[in-house]
Image (cartoon, rainbow, N blue to C red):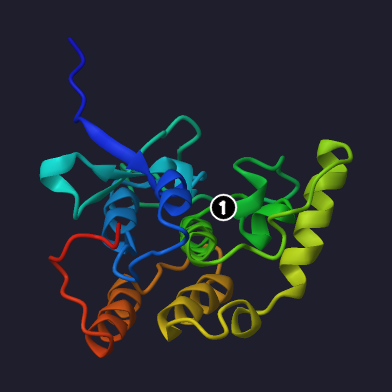
Amino acid sequence: ALVLDLLGADLQFMRKKCGGRFSIKTTLIPTIRYIHSKDFVHRDIKPGNLLLGAKDNETSVYIVDFGIARRYRNPRNGAHIPFLDGKSVVGTVRYLSLNTHFGMAQTRRDDIECLAYSLLDCLRDLPWGNIRGGSPKQFEDRVREKKRSWTPERLCADIPSAFKVLLSHARQLKFDEEPDYDGLQAAFMDDMKRRGYSSDEPFDW
């Protein structure tokens, strides 16, 4: 028999329920680091795939739906996949990394960029969030160009600085470069301390 943990609502639902209130401590960086340590990239990080724990575990957030996850390195010898472009777009357009929009194979940097957009979307509406209509290709093109026009500084204005650190870092990573998980987590922890959060408090909702 297949046994699964009982999980709660996803962050997309909780954002709507709570009017956009969202704790900066919901960073999920250690969880993504663990996935990457197993040689996989998720390739579809989005609020709908980020679920709260059940009532007795509400301080945890889980990543679900590994249907399009792929290996980014060989588990036998640790060799990273070679750079590839001209790839079909895989994932949810709203949260795709810019490199994915431009047809590059997804690696660790892309999960980090998807996480940045997912967390930002739980704080405020993304500038490309209301784009609708046209063919799938036209829709993806419009989202890509809008996304490209927004720098991390502009997109993360007037919110905790850790979000700009997260997005800037993701966009600057090389194809096969390991993210600075410790540095990213430290940026969020510093913001939490400045705002009086405790790492073991329940979330805002």
The residue labelled by disc 1 is: 82
**As drawn, 184 above or below 81:** below
**As drawn, 102 above or below 76:** below
> Residue at the spot x=46%, y=38% of the render?
69
> Residue at the spot x=31%, y=84% of the render?
191
Determine whether, in the image, residue 5 is placed left or right of residue 180: left
In what element is the residue under mark 1? Answer: loop
**As drawn, 200 above or below 14:** below
Give the residue at the far bottom of this rendering: 194
The image quadrant of residue 25 is bottom left
Q: Residue 140 in the image: x percent, y percent?
A: 78, 48
Q: Residue 119 in the image: x percent, y percent?
A: 46, 62
- The number of numbered discs placed on residues in the rendered structure image is 1
Q: Residue 158 in the image: x percent, y percent?
A: 53, 85
> Residue at the spot x=83%, y=52% of the render?
141
Visible residue check, residue 42? no
Visible residue check, residue 138? yes
* In the foreground, 52 or 105: 52
Q: For the C terminus, give its image quadrant.
A: bottom left
